[in-house]
Amino acid sequence: MTIDLFDDNEQPHMEQIGPEAFIFYRSANHIEHIFTREIRRLLQVEPPRQMRTPSGLPMSVLSSACGSWGWQSSENGYSYTDASPISNKQWPQMPSAFKDFAAQIAAQAGFANFSPNSCLINCYSVGSKLGLHEDRDEGDFSQPIVSLSFGIPAIFLWGGPKRNDKVKRFRLCHGDVVVWGGQSRRYYHGVSQIKSGCHESWGSKRINLTLRYVERV
Ligand code: MD3
Ligand code: FE
């Protein structure tokens, strides 16, 4: 019998998935406790809520935010706002651990001086999904986006610059980080329907943070 001694404490590794787009597998695991604590605190201050798409359909993903700007979807379209429409208060400050980690990993992907001012917190349950879309509401596309995944795994769908480009699938697990910018910044992407699972700190949930730089428009 062979016991795989390296399975649980494998070194983080990186995969290039497209032009200027990378997955750093398990790279947030060493600081997962800071992220877990901060995400829980932020979700108590601004509980995740169900938004509607411009066509009026409820999203299956619940969202919250922190930082100077929070992304919104409603019947009026997509936008970034400086206050929560639920509490009418400014979004909670982005924890410095989020900023520092994102800047550091962006630099490893070749993006110097990334300074996010917006963090979208997406909360997935079993059955949640995110249709193919591009992130195009930030006003500045020179900066990358950094995404961190926690909890149960997801299959993320990575397309190309056109909606009908062929899609590749990658499995994102607890602690995985995706960085994409430059040519890939406006590529279509999405998340397949989440399969049931159980994670030791997040139960049957998946949390995804996307750290962005939003230009005031
Ligand atoms: C972008 N979130 O919030 S992040 C979003 O897992 C969003 O919650 C997804 O898309 C999530 O807008 C995906 C990771 C990701 C991966 C590959 C991409 C984003 C990407 C490729 C191109 C552009
Ligand atoms: Fe997106």
Image (cartoon, helix red, strand yellow):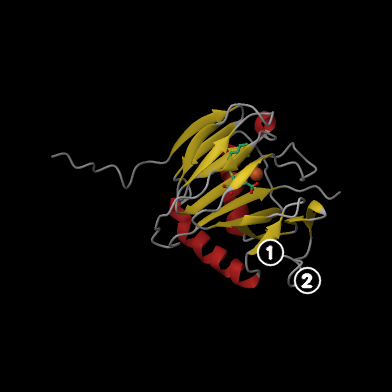
* Badge 2 element: loop
List the residue tagged with mark 2.
88
**Against 50, is 210 above or below?**
above
Callout 1: SS: loop
Q: Quadrant of the N terminus?
A: top left
Question: What residue is shown at x 83% (from left), y 50% (from top)?
Answer: 216
Q: Position of residue 162 (x, y in %)?
A: 69, 28
Residue at image position (52%, 59%) is 35
Residue at image x 61%, y 67%? 42
Looking at the rendered structure, the kind of residue marked 1 is Gln
In the orientation shown, which residue stands out farthest toward the right? 217
Crowdedness near tag 1: few (<14), some (14–19) or many (≥20) residues, C-alpha within 10 Å: some
Q: Amino acid at mark 2?
A: Asn
Quarter of the image for residue 97 reads bottom right
C-beta proximity under 8 Å, tags 2 and 1: no
Marks 2/1: CA–CA distance: 15 Å
For this rendering, which residue is in front, 63 or 180?
63
In the picture of the structure, the residue carrying the numbered disc 1 is: 93
* Side of 199 relative to 41 (left or right): left
Within 8 Å: ligand 1 and the Cβ of disc 1?
no
Classify 10 Å Cα crowding around label 2: few (below 14), some (14-19), many (20 and above). few
Q: Quadrant of ligand 2?
A: top right
Q: Give me the disc on residue 164.
A: none
Q: Nearer the viewer, residue 133 or 24?
A: 133
Provide residue 56's location: percent of width, then percent of height: 75, 55
